[in-house]
Amino acid sequence: MIVLDMNIVSEAGRQNPDARVKNWMRIQPLTDLYLCAPVVAELSFGAQRMLLKTGSDRLLTGLRTMVDRTFNGRILHFDGPAAELAGRLQARREAEGRPIAIGDLWIAAICLHHGATLATRNTRDFLGLDLRLENPFEHGH
């Protein structure tokens, strides 16, 4: 199980995505790829921002397709156990003097709760959380 961070979903959706990300996505079984609720929220924010700024609903349409079809049944939620885990992670990071953004915290907790790997470009943001990380931007190097 691999949860895609927003930066991977965004890159994969570009007209000319980074070749490493494109190749990495191509070799992953689609059924192994998941989204999580905080990533859907980030994608929704970007799509709504584009709609308000330009009037284009292209990103909203793409998001609807991802949620309703591509990742149907494969969107992990931020539930009670993940929330408790998030509190422990946040306290640990604070004690280490390394605060973590709330969205990243929720993503990490969801991944850890489900035993999932996180595919992200921003691996540094998640270090020290005992989370399996994969950076598709480094794939093939």
Image: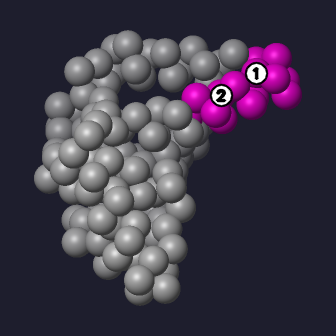
Q: Which residues are magenta?
A: 43-56
| Helix, strand or loop status at disc 1 | helix
Residue at 34% across, 14% down: 69
Q: Looking at the picture, does residue 107 appear above or below residue 126?
A: above
How far across and down, in percent of the image, does residue 22 sit?
A: 40, 47
Residue 98 is situated, as x and y percent measured from the top left of the image, at: 48, 80
Q: Give coordinates of residue 104: x percent, y percent.
A: 46, 57
Name the image quarter holding residue 44.
Answer: top right
Mark 2 neighbour density, 10 Å: few (under 14) some (14–19) many (20 or more) = many
| Residue at (85, 28) in percent of width and height | 53
Residue under pointer 1:
51
The reply to whether callout 2 and callout 1 are in contact (CB within 8 Å) is yes
Which amino acid type corresponds to the residue marked 1 in the rendered image? Leu
Say above or below: 43 vs 3: above
How far, Cα to Cα, is label 2 from label 1? 6 Å
The amino acid type found where label 2 is placed reads Ala
In percent of the image, x 49 and y 85: which residue is there?
97
Residue 49 on the magenta span: yes
- What is the quadrant of the C terminus in the image? bottom left
Q: Is residue 59 left or right of residue 134?
A: right
The residue at the far right in this view is 53
What secondary structure is found at the residue carrying circle 2?
helix
Query: Quarter-wise, where is residue 120 in the image?
Result: bottom left
> Is residue 116 among the parts visible in the rendering?
no
Q: Which residue is mark 2?
A: 47
Q: Is residue 57 left or right of residue 84?
A: right
**Residue 51 among magenta residues:** yes
